[in-house]
Amino acid sequence: WKNPSCNGVLPPGSMGLPLIGETLHLIIPSYSLDLHPFIKKRIQRFGPIFRTNILGRPVVVSTDPELNHLILQQEGKLVEMWYLDTFSKLFNQEGESRTSAVGVIHKYIRSLSLTHFGVETLKKGLLPEIEDMIKKTLQMWSTQESIEVKYGSAVMVFNYIAKHMFGYDDSENTSEDKISEKFTKISEFLMSIPLNIPGTTYHKCLKDREKATKFLKDKLEERRNSPDMYRGDLLDQVIADLNKEDKEKFLSDDFIITVIFGLLFAGFESVSKILTLTLKLLADHPSVLQELIAEHEGILKNRRNSDPVLTWDEYKSMTFTLQVINESLRLGNGAPGLLRRALKDIEFKGFTIPAGWIIMAVTSASHLNPDVYKDPLAFNPARWKDMDPYLVSKNFMPFSGGTRQCAGAEFSKLLMATFLHVLLTKYEYVPVSFLPFQWHLLLFVIRQDHVACFCTGFCSRIVNGFSGFEFLNHRWTRIKGGRVVQGPMLGFRDGFHVKFSPDHN
Ligand code: HEM
């Protein structure tokens, strides 16, 4: 394993231990948004392209923007998409059947997701539905003692996508049967070592997958046997496809379940991570929060019609909000890299990547390149104002690129922007004071039976507008957590707990 054969010169690197390679280095948690220390150290030692071994597979890690760009553009020719073995088992795709199914799944899943979550659908009617769902979610959150935002938003996005795809209603299920719980738990286990022994996280993951799959199968059966339940949603579309006389050969119940499973997964996990990171970064950066609030208040002020619903044009006018979201996407790389398998030997800059090897394209390396993004670890949404569009196209790939570009990108941005709009126009951020007293002037505002304490050090807006100050019934306050961890997937150590206060009126 130490000196793999190759028809050329392998990139430099080390293959670690037999069987596990250098996996342990990669899963050591890192508590920063910077490149994972394992990748940083290897770059210093071997340069931007190096070889290693992860989970027993020979891997070439690339932080080289040109190579990353090349492999994203050469899907199906030089490389094919490859999931970790854990992912493959999770999605019931293994061995040759997996390889041949990937291309077909790709085409079908892409077209399905664009039909149901693409720009045209968003424009036509999804936006008001999303806004309504977010208002109800925040209202519901505000009845809880506190919310762990990553988990709460994962459930929110899962429920919305599942409702939209097959009419799922979480409130109809007891907590034991809530399928959202099964899915959100499965995601915790994704990077586990594939050891199917009772007690391992991998084993639990497979058990939860069984339950989730059974649930989806029952849904499919139920809808098929009750034509009066027709809603024109994704499930109805796939049932119609299955019933066609000249249906595609690959279409089967199992295939459909895999597609729905994959789509649910592709959606809720990434959005909830980036949304949580955005709230955490906003809580850490009061001046950015101020500017964002001003933008959303401006939208309300400029609204001519009395209909209090966000429009597509208003969403598109949220320049600063979209900069904030871009900045979160830039910093919050959900996974260490995009995974591909070389279909043939790839020659690049004097090195050869042998056919069959895995390539991990670390696109986040470009996101943190100081030559492109000055002071790259700083959360500075204003930087996007002056970014050169050409540089951005080459160095900003949170949604991947080429034919595999995320089919839910616009949906995700719109959902996050709408969430921020509802949150910031309806709920005031009240920071918990944790700096020494002498750094602050504490204002106690007493009206009726409510008492609130505002800290000037963090919330200058309240101080500036103090003369015309209105008592705020809706508030959100960071309670605890928010420490980012890459292990190697992005997460939040101890979660990010926020108290959303109820409306007293
Ligand atoms: C912040 C949120 C999201 C991020 C950062 C994100 C990121 C990505 C990335 C990086 C890929 C490409 C993976 C690769 O090249 O190996 C991808 C693919 C995909 N995403 Fe997303 N995603 C997000 C949300 C969503 C949502 C909400 C949906 C569905 C509603 C979705 C559906 C898909 C689909 C279907 C693909 C496969 C596209 C294809 O292979 O043609 N994503 N996403």
Image (tube, helix red, strand yellow):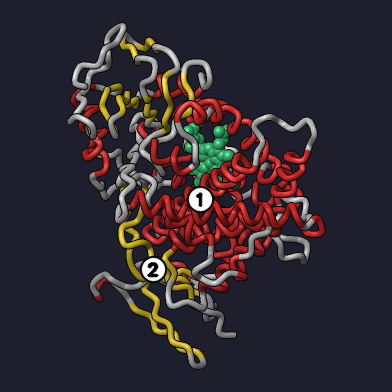
Q: Nearer the viewer, residue 469 or 179?
A: 179
Question: In this figure, which residue is indicated by the disc labeled 2?
Answer: 478
The picture quadrant where one finds residue 351 is top left
Query: Does 176 sit above or below residue 267?
Result: below
| Quarter where residue 348 is shown | top left
Q: Position of residue 356 (x, y in %)?
A: 39, 19
How far across and down, in percent of the image, does residue 400 sit? 49, 33
Residue at the image position 45 percent from the left and 29 percent from the top? 95
Q: Are discs 1 and 2 less than 8 Å apart at CB?
A: no
Q: Which residue is mark 1?
A: 271
Say which residue appears at 26% left-offset and 43% top-offset: 27
Q: Which residue in the rendered view is the most extreme toward the bottom?
A: 449
Residue 454 position (above or below residue 111): below
Specify which label sits upstream in the sequence, 1 or 2.
1
Q: Amino acid at mark 2?
A: Arg
- Per the image, label 2 sits on a secondary structure element best described as strand
Q: Nearer the viewer, residue 252 or 362?
A: 252
- The CB of the residue at mark 1 lies under 8 Å from ligand 1: yes
User: Please, what secondary structure does the residue beneath circle 1 have?
Assistant: helix
Q: Please, what is the three-letter code of the amino acid marked with disc 1?
A: Val
The residue that appears at 31% across and 58% down in the rendered structure is 493
Outermost residue toward the right in this view: 228
Image coords of residue 449 (percent x, y): 49, 93
Q: Is residue 468 above or below residue 260?
A: below
